[in-house]
Amino acid sequence: MSAAFGKQKRLLDKRDFDAVMTPRGTPAIKVVAKGLVVFARARSNDPVNDIGSRLGLVVSRKVGNSPQRNLVKRIVRETFRNGDYARSSTAAYDIVVLARPELGSMGRVTIRASVAESFATLTRRIHRTRLSPPAAHEGNPA
């Protein structure tokens, strides 16, 4: 497996971030963890662009100086790539990780644990969403 994190695996445009983070159309999954918030939204299955999940990062200056922000981004990308989240059950999702300011004051081990926990929770919620039957509308007899 390549350690590269190419452009096809990243969210790059404001449009892509807005599609995941704003409540329109398909419901987004939101996971709140220590120091970060993770949003995920299902993508349409396009067989031509079957690239797996795409990851977007939002790390503001409130998190810390540039070395601290880069450390946070590196840990999130590494956890995403090494945890098989890009290829497993989340394969048709766009994921945005929003770092909160308190993440900058945490150590590397704590950041890794928080990110891994949030991705695991996200994976469980995606499985639950896929396995649960669609809700029947009250007005429609099924």
Image: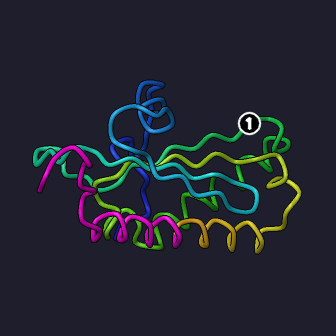
Residue drawn at x 33%, y 41% as measured from the top left: 26
Figure check: 22 above or below 139: above
Assess disc 1: are there few (<14), some (14-19) or many (≥20) residues with their C-alpha within 10 Å of its C-alpha.
Answer: some
Identify the magenta region.
Answer: 120-142
Image quadrant of residue 115?
Answer: bottom right
For image coordinates 24% across by 65% down, the residue present is 133
Based on the picture, tell me whether residue 3 belongs to the magenta stretch.
no
Give the labeled residue for mark 1.
Answer: 60
Is 125 rendered above or below residue 43?
below
Residue at position x 21%, y 43% from top?
139
Q: How is the image coloured?
A: rainbow
Q: Quadrant of the N terminus?
A: bottom left
- Image coordinates of residue 93 in percent, x first then y, are 35, 52
Q: Is residue 100 left or right of residue 29?
A: right
Residue lying farthest to the right in this orientation: 105
* Residue 129 counted in the magenta span: yes
Report the side of 37 relative to 29 (left or right).
right
* Image position of 100 with respect to 113: above or below: above
Q: Nearer the viewer, residue 53 or 8?
A: 53
Query: Is residue 137 or residue 31 the one in the foreground?
Result: 137
Name the residue nearer the viewer: 40 or 105: 40
Task: Tell me where residue 108 appears, x and y as whole percent.
Answer: 77, 68
**Count of number-bearing discs:** 1
Name the secondary structure under disc 1: loop
Locate the C terminus and report the quarter of the image it occupies: bottom left
Residue 127 relative to residue 97: left or right: left
Residue 31 image point, x, y percent: 58, 58
Residue depicted at 39% across the width and 49% down the height: 54
Q: Amino acid at mark 1?
A: Ser
Apparent side of residue 9 relative to residue 116 in the rendered image (left or right): left
